[in-house]
Amino acid sequence: MNKVYINILSKKGNDGGSKARSDINRVLRDRGYTELAIPFLNNCSSILKAIKKLILNIDGNSTVVMQVPMGRKLSLFLLIIHKLIRFKLIIIIHDIEELRKIYIKRKYQITVERKFYQNCDVLICHNNNMKNHLIGRNISANKIIPIEIFDYILDSDEQINCNINKNILIIAGNLTHERCPYVYLLKQLCLKNTQIVLYGFGYGSEDEKNEKISYQGCFSPEEMPNILETGWGLAWDGESLDSCTGDTGEYLVYINQHKISLYLSAGLPVILWEKSGLAPFIKENKAGIAISSLRNIENILKQITDEQYKEMQNNARSLAQKLRKGYFAHTAIEKAETILNI
């Protein structure tokens, strides 16, 4: 059995994926898959080289894992040779372009994406909301596996923090006006007892002076879990404090925000939008709270006792042990292999 995973390299020739993708690649290697490295696809020559490499390394006895999106041309070609050679194809979805509405005017792109999902052998998606969307696109429910949550693998043996301070809200990630507009509305909350701490890039701190909002800089994904010591990890998005609105906000219904994995890996309970795709998982594991609006966040926090916070923190720390070891990716891939009798 030839087990491979496709990895698109960055322009510099190294692993071009985000931490979520890189962590899955690591789990695949642990499970005996060999990397099939594809050069960065930036012109016709690189695409032809990629196609040649696929033809030379994949046959009817192969099991191929591909994380998507990975480019329309490569996806289309892989779909063609999958039909011809009939190797086993496992797709791991990070984003669905149709739901992101990036290609809303490019019907051909959406058609290729749907055909790709319909013709693969197993799909690993984010959660049940995304699974139901895929079923609505004529994809068999029997071949769809929700991963539940993306892992956050760490090599560090440092202890997970267990300090108690339920009056700190932590926001980590892309903090630009374009990507995270709600952050620049937080000063409207007129907080008295709650401190908001920001980590990430793109924050216009020179324009947003507020004693209750502090910016602590940008750190690597590996550093962040050991920097976040206490408080709540806040996962919100969109253009409003009242709800998660706009295209980015509405997209939360279907996806597992990776920043939630970051927060949990640090042992922080989370606060997230009640309609987000990860809300059922967080409530089931009692590792945080789901809310409808940020407008009354301070009153919500006042009602939570130290004992309740401590319980959620302990549950977050239990999840951290799994996330740091790649438990959820291992489990989903094992289920995919079972379906394929590997």
Image (cartoon, helix red, strand yellow):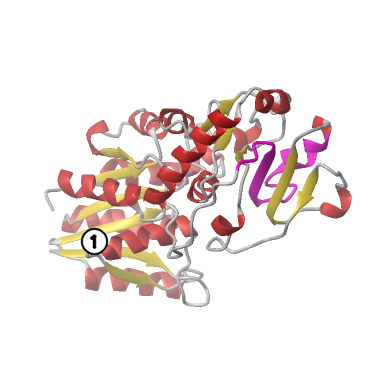
Residue in view at x 65 percent, y 40 percent: 165
**Residue bearing mark 1:** 31
Q: How many marks?
A: 1
The image quadrant that residue 76 belongs to is bottom left
Q: Whole-percent x and y of residue 319?
A: 41, 44
Q: Whole-percent x and y of residue 89?
A: 24, 53
Residue in view at x 55 percent, y 56 percent: 225
Q: Is residue 176 magenta?
A: yes
Q: Whole-percent x and y of residue 133?
A: 40, 30
Foreground pick, 218 / 325? 325
Residue 235 in the image: above or below residue 92: above
Residue in view at x 21 percent, y 66 percent: 58
Q: Is residue 77 magenta?
A: no
Residue 137 in the image: above or below residue 43: above
Q: Is residue 332 visible?
A: yes
Q: Is residue 108 visible?
A: no
Residue 54 in the image: above or below residue 180: below
Badge 1 density bin: few <14, some 14–19, many ≥20, Cα 10 Å: few
Q: Whole-percent x and y of residue 190?
A: 83, 31
Local SS, label 1? loop
The reply, left or right, for residue 28 in relation to residue 262 is left
Residue in view at x 17 percent, y 43 percent: 339
The reply, left or right, for residue 294 in relation to residue 164 is right
Q: Amino acid at mark 1?
A: Arg
Q: Which residues are magenta?
A: 164-187
Foreground pick, 163 / 54? 163
The reply, left or right, for residue 207 in relation to residue 148 is right
Foreground pick, 227 / 248? 227
Point out the image quarter for the N terminus. bottom left
